Amino acid sequence: MHVVAISTVSDSDLFWNALKLAYGQLPAGANRVLAIASTDGTGAINVVVHGSPEEVRSFFEEHIGGYAATDYVEADAANAIGLPVA
């Protein structure tokens, strides 16, 4: 399943450094699809293929939880445009 992580970032430098480390340690079977920031650094959207939003939350919050408030939701793949097949 595709999980979308929508973050409001409080410290852009620390957030992106931590996120890069997190992506290097993704759990087995998880794949990064997209990581994008707003131009002002206060917003981020990440798309990860993994088992559930709760599993992505559990993993990412260890790394980025101190630098952003993030919502994790399952993507509606049937209505998505441009989302690669999981």
Image: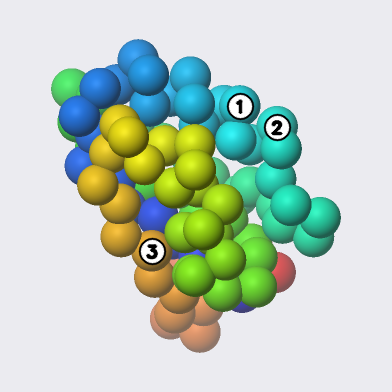
Residue type indicated by callout 3: Tyr
Dot 2 corresponds to which residue? 24
**Picture quarter with the C terminus:** bottom right
The amino acid at mark 1 is Leu
Amino acid identity at mark 2 = Gly
Is residue 72 visible to us here? yes
Q: Quarter-wise, where is residue 39 in the image?
A: top left
Up/down of 83 relative to 60, above or below: below
Would you call the spot at circle 2 few (<14 residues within 10 Å), some (14-19), or many (20 or more)? Answer: few
Residue 72: image tag: 3
Residue 15 placed where, x, y %?
A: 38, 27
Instruction: Using the numbered discs, state the Cα–Cα distance from disc 3 to disc 1 in whole angstroms.
Output: 19 Å
Q: Do callouts 2 and 1 mark residues in contact (Cβ within 8 Å)?
A: yes
Cβ–Cβ below 8 Å for labels 3 and 2?
Answer: no
SS class, disc 2: loop
Residue 46 image position (x, y, % from top left): 45, 47
Q: Looking at the picture, how far across and down is residue 36, in whole percent?
A: 41, 36
Q: Please say whether residue 39 is visible from this viewpoint.
A: no
Q: Which residue is drawn at 29% across and 21% down?
A: 12
The residue tagged 1 is 21
Q: Residue furthest bottom?
A: 78
